[in-house]
């Protein structure tokens, strides 16, 4: 057994990044509190003409028809900020964070950290039907990225701190630290390594402990429902199908509206004002659809609203949210999804068999979130942390899983990745353990190696090894079993032209650093070095002190681990028969697709 091989690849930098992530979590929590206060400030300015950070709902305004103008003014301000400040503030936050992670080396500008919360506060405070979580995810991510740039960290470490800031912001807004970590795992990290998971978890823990000191403790929507009856499984599956269809419909119409805005004959900076007009009209007829609407979500979960009111809220919220978000303004998607999902559950709950009607707004809410975001585990834990309703865990899991399955089958991309795809980037959301991580050099290397004697002359080496019968592109050069270099045709030909025909081959490499591999290195590490240095193969030595040659590993060898994954996916096995009477099992018969 090789004691040097561990479960994870770690180094001393992990502790440093984790400590920085804790600081990022603290800063993101303060940023979240600031954003919530900023939203309240603009809400009071737009709808009550007072300078206050009191938590007033825009639904309580007495503006009459003037309420239609408020979102229009907010849209004009957002368009101006995006045009002359930073276009990155447009959108709902999470796609922009994913794009920065995968295609922007996790770099965000200071402008985004300042202008995103400002624009979002204006958009939401003027009645925009959005949540605060998308903007704070973007803002927290920008803070993490800026701190990483200050410490001159690598792109991978910047990604870790960007995600740590993003999920800490979500924790601060909703008080859901575990769901925020799952958001990182299912949507943002695109890997599952200690270097990324540990800092994200610590950042969320810091935000979770700080939140009660700044924003109060306890679940945002406390709820206690009864367990479902015997028909619960079928009912939850049906709820998942309906929520999946709702996710498909909302996502489809959102991008149809976005395409319609793109065909308008004037600049995009005016689009949020046009979207604001739709918001204002909808808000005039149903004021409770304006703004974040956490109070409305609470009432829906508690079944405190009449059926006619719920129907109006769901329809108006869906229409104004799709139009406003399609216009390119700034705001989040989680809170609107929670409201629409809970509304559908409140409408259908009395007709759903198998249990307490009060549970269905919560189930539809989580299922809609899991399907739309394609993050079912996050959605389940998120709903649980919002309510602390343990009885709902199994129904939530069933409905969210079915909704997720529906969208995977019927939607090519989610509401998040579709936006990125429209910018020319494709994201493949499936990921697993790299086969190169699972295998080490000594498992794939060629052990019988043809070598060149270091004392052989250059001309003789060219004639013997690089003539018409040449078998390899390069050969290890050894002296008494010790590696001294790697010889290729071009290097020897250059030496020959320089009049070094009789020079010993080994002397060509007397003062050069050798690129080597060690038997217990992972294939991934070696593959990365081959790519970085444009090499085709490297010699393998027993250790870095003796340089005793034990093999050679090439790009062709590094393909072998991937073949095992291909066989696992494509090769099928079946038993011909099992004889219980004679205690014998038949051999398996294999066939390939």
Image: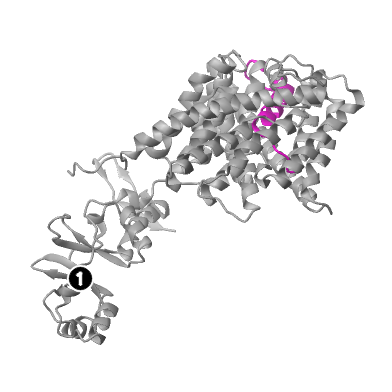
481 left or right, relative to 520: left
Q: In front: 483, or 342?
A: 483
User: Image height check: is 244 above or below 52?
Assistant: below
The residue drawn where x is 45% and y is 47% is 155
Res 30 quadrant in image = top right
Q: Is residue 343 magenta?
A: yes
Residue 404 x/y as whole percent: 58, 37
Give the color scheme: rainbow, by chain, secondary structure or one colour: one colour
User: Which type of secondary structure does the marked residue at label 1 adopt?
Assistant: helix
Q: Is residue 223 visible?
A: yes
Q: Quadrant of the C terminus?
A: bottom left
Res 461 quadrant in image = bottom left
Residue 321 x/y as whole percent: 75, 35
Which stretch did the figure color magenta? 328-357
Using a 10 Å C-alpha cutoff, classify the residue at mark 1 as few (fewer than 14 neighbours), some (14 to 19) or many (20 or more): some
Residue 172 x/y as whole percent: 56, 24
The residue drawn where x is 73% and y is 43% is 328
Q: How many marks?
A: 1
Q: Which residue is mark 1?
A: 509
Q: Is residue 91 magenta?
A: no
The residue drawn where x is 13% and y is 79% is 456
SS assignment for the magenta stretch, majority: helix
The residue drawn where x is 17% and y is 43% is 1
């Amino acid at each position: 057994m090789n004691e040097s091989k561990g479960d994870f690849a770690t180094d001393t930098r992990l502790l440093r990044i984790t400590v920085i992530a804790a600081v990022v979590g603290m800063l993101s929590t303060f940023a979240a509190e600031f954003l919530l206060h900023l939203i309240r400030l603009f809400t009071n300015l737009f709808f009550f003409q007072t300078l206050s950070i009191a938590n007033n709902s825009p639904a309580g305004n007495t503006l009459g028809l003037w309420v239609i103008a408020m979102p229009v003014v907010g849209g004009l301000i957002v368009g101006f900020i995006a045009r002359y400040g930073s276009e990155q503030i447009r959108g709902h936050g999470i796609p922009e964070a994913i794009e920065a992670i995968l295609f922007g080396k996790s770099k965000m500008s200071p402008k985004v950290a300042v202008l995103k919360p400002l624009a979002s506060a204006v958009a939401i405070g003027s009645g925009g039907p959005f949540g605060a979580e998308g903007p704070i995810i973007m803002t927290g991510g920008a803070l993490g990225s800026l701190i990483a740039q200050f410490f001159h960290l690598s792109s991978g470490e910047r990604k870790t701190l960007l995600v740590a800031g993003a999920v800490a912001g979500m924790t601060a807004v909703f008080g859901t630290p575990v769901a925020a970590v799952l958001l990182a795992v299912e949507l943002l990290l695109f890997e599952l390594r200690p270097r990324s998971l540990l800092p994200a978890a610590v950042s969320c823990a810091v935000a979770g402990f700080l939140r009660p000191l700044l924003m109060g403790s306890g679940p945002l929507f406390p709820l206690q429902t009864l367990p479902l009856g015997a028909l619960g499984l079928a009912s939850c599956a049906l709820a998942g199908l309906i929520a999946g269809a709702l996710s498909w419909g909302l996502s489809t119409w959102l991008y149809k509206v976005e395409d319609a805005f793109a065909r308008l004959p004037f600049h995009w900076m005016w689009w949020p004002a046009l979207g604001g007009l739709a918001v204002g009209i909808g808000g005039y007829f149903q004021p409770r659809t304006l703004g974040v609407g956490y109070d409305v979500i609470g009432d829906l979960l508690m079944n405190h609203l009449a059926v006619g009111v719920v129907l109006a809220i769901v329809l108006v919220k869906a229409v104004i949210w799709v139009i406003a978000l399609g216009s390119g303004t700034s705001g989040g998607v989680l809170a609107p999804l929670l409201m629409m999902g809970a509304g559908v559950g409140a409408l259908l709950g009395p007709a759903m068999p198998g249990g307490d009607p009060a549970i269905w707004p919560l189930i539809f809410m989580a299922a809609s979130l899991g399907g739309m975001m394609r993050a079912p585990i996050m959605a389940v834990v998120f709903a649980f942390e919002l309510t602390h309703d343990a009885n709902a865990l199994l129904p939530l899991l069933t409905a969210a899983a079915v909704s997720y399955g529906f969208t995977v089958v019927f939607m090519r991309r989610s509401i998040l990745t579709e936006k990125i795809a429209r910018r020319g980037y494709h994201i493949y959301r499936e990921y697993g353990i790299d086969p190169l991580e699972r295998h080490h050099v000594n498992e794939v290397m060629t052990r019988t190696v043809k070598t060149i004697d270091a004392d052989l002359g250059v001309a003789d080496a060219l004639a013997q090894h690089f003539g018409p019968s040449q078998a390899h592109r390069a050969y290890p050069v050894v002296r008494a079993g010790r590696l001294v270099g790697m010889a290729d045709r071009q290097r020897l030909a250059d030496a020959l032209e320089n009049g070094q025909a009789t020079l010993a081959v080994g002397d060509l490499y007397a003062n050069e650093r050798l690129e080597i591999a060690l038997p217990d290195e992972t294939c991934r590490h070696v593959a990365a070095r081959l790519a970085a240095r444009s090499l085709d193969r490297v010699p393998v030595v027993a250790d870095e002190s003796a340089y005793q040659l034990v093999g050679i590993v090439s790009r062709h060898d590094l393909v072998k681990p991937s073949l095992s994954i291909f066989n696992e996916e494509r090769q099928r096995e079946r038993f011909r028969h099992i004889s219980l009477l004679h205690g014998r099992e038949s051999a398996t018969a294999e066939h390939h697709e």
